[in-house]
Amino acid sequence: MLKLFFMKKFIVLLALCLGFAAQAQETYRFAERDTCSLYLDIYRPAAGSQTQLDSLDKPAIMYVFGGGFIMGERSHPWHLPWFRTLNENGYTVVTVDYRLGMKGVKVGKGMSGALQASDAFENAQQMGVEDVISAVTFLLEQKDSLGIDPYNMVISGSSAGAIISLATEYALVSGRAKGLPEDFNFKGVMSFAGGIISNSGAPHFPKAPCPILLLHGTADQAVQYKSMALFGKGIWGSSWLANDWKRAGYNNYCIYRFKDSTHDVAMYMEVLWDLEKTFLEQNVIRGHARSVDALVDDASLPHWMQISLGDIYK
């Protein structure tokens, strides 16, 4: 936990020292829960930026923050450079709150401890999914006044936020996303070190999901790159999901497997903009059925420190 504390402090200090700023921000309350109010922030495209490609409107990007379901902020200073990049490239950014379902929950050591806490993890994931659905519902209701079309929106997330993003798409494809129109789906998903938590066996998509971009380190010790399960309870990571989609014949996903990289990839949003840009322009906006499965071995990528489940839930 000490390592995580110092890393968080370093990230905040770095962002503040570099003086990053985003475009003008709007904040709205989108839901009331028993324990808290939930808000979203909107960052608009920069003046003069191109908000269309080939006469097609660029999608809004909904961002779901990470933090192990125990901490995090919807508009943390670390993310502002990425929001600014998106804005300068003509994309609206929507950042959302969700309830932190693992806050105060005790988790034992290692994989065995995580599996013993599987019910709590799945509940935290489900709370996040419910809160994302509430945010989408709010945007649907305020579509005209806010000028954001949720039917033209990509959901993205880091770590726990990536888990929530993928689980929300899984709920939509499986017909379990209560509260949204039956025909609703995202235009895409961008997952930075994510997976899907399940206590009822491996998550098999009954039909092809929307276009999905998966980015994950092969040595991730916080969110499993492959899978970690016992008696049908566990987490199925990016590699397992991509391999399952390949077996099913789905052809609109891109996975980049970062060789020997750790959970650092969860913080690569700004670093990997070129990959995101290609995915957004080709898979999402132009609608090309395009699949990529690449192992990336790049020593120039930044590395901070390894984070394990023990570090997060110590």
Image: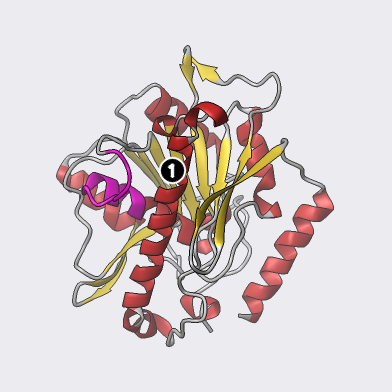
> Which residue is drawn at the image coordinates 43% and 34% (left, top)?
150
Pick the residue in front: 196 or 186.
186
> Which residue is drawn at the image coordinates 29% and 28% (left, top)?
289
- Of all residues shown, which one is farthest toward the top? 55
Q: Amino acid at mark 1?
A: Val
> Which residue is drawn at the image coordinates 69% and 18% (left, top)?
48
Pick the residue in front: 4 or 41.
41
Q: Position of residue 132 (x, y in %)?
A: 43, 51
- Placement of the N terminus among the 4 image quadrants: bottom right
Q: Position of residue 75 (x, y in %)?
A: 64, 51
From the viewer's perspective, is 262 left or right of 84?
Answer: left
From the viewer's perspective, is 120 left or right of 39?
Answer: left
From the image, tell me which residue sits under label 1: 136
Q: What is the magenta range? A: 167-181
Q: Position of residue 159 (x, y in %)?
A: 48, 60
| Residue 7 appearing in the image | yes
Q: Position of residue 38 (x, y in %)?
A: 55, 56
Residue count near mark 1 (Cα–Cα under 10 Å), binned few <14, some 14–19, many ≥20: many
Q: Tell me where residue 14 sits by quadrant.
A: bottom right
* Residue 198 on the magenta segment: no
